[in-house]
Amino acid sequence: MTKLSVNINKIATLRNARGGNVPDVIRAAIDLERFGAEGITVHPRPDERHIRKSDVYELKKVVTTELNIEGYPSGDFLKMVEDIKPAQVTLVPDPPEALTSNAGWDTVKYRDFLIPIIRRLKQAGIRTSIFVEPDPKAVAAAKATGTDRIELYTETYAKGYAAGKAKAIAGCVAAATAAKEAGIGINAGHDLSLENLGYFHRHIPGLLEVSIGHALIADALYLGLENTVNLYKRQLV
């Protein structure tokens, strides 16, 4: 069964736009779990423009499903996740100034960089995932890093979905098949939505988890948060 992990960065963005603590990010995480989310994802950045470091420590105290922390493996980031020990860390190649994740790791070029980082996280008892392009070659190189899982970067799929579903998803299917054959767990995320999630889920073998933030929070403005979580979960049945 594929788990839904909700990225709450956008809730923190709204809070930070006004100051104060409305909406309450911690309360939102608790409610999302109560509504059926099977994980909470955050991507703290050095400038704390949405999720703050203090939020991450507080979330560790209340999240009862799985806390997934995304980020670039800087020294500060690694120290934080070793302190917190979330269920999963997802490594992304974003520079600090990036607006959002916009590419997967070049796992061939950065294999030797990633190997000791992943070893370090696993020694701390943290499941590791690395953000990769939907390419079997990237998956094969990811296997060599020792990662537990990959997270398929799905922006290309989402952008091409309306023009042709089968063509848009082909790369993801090939990458997922390679990951399954290599014994690597498969996560996915970026621009997945109510429109394209069901088709993606039906065609990706061994999909363990999707991480969705922007589209889900945007839909919740119209549909309500509890209803929106349930609608997304229905796409994963």
Image (cartoon, rainbow, N blue to C red):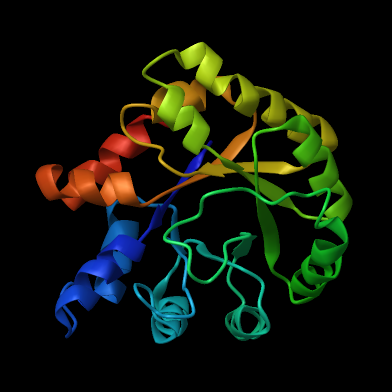
Asked whether, in this view, residue 42 is left or right of residue 225, the answer is right
Picture coordinates of residue 102, whole percent (x, y): 52, 50
- On the picture, is 194 further left or further right than 202? left
Can residue 226 be seen? no
Q: Position of residue 32 (x, y in %)?
A: 30, 58
Q: In this view, which residue lies farthest toward the front?
A: 97
- Determine whether 221 is above or below 8 in the image: above
Where is residue 204? Give x, y as percent: 59, 26
- Vertical comparison of 53 with 87: above or below: below
| In-front residue for pair 60/133 | 133
Q: Is residue 220 left or right of residue 64?
A: left
Horizontal and vertical percent position of residue 142: 79, 47
- Residue nearest the observer in this picture, 83 or 99: 99
Residue 17 in view here: yes
Determine the image quadrant of residue 10: bottom left
Q: Nearer the viewer, residue 186 or 233?
A: 186
Residue positioned 41% across, 76% down in the render: 59
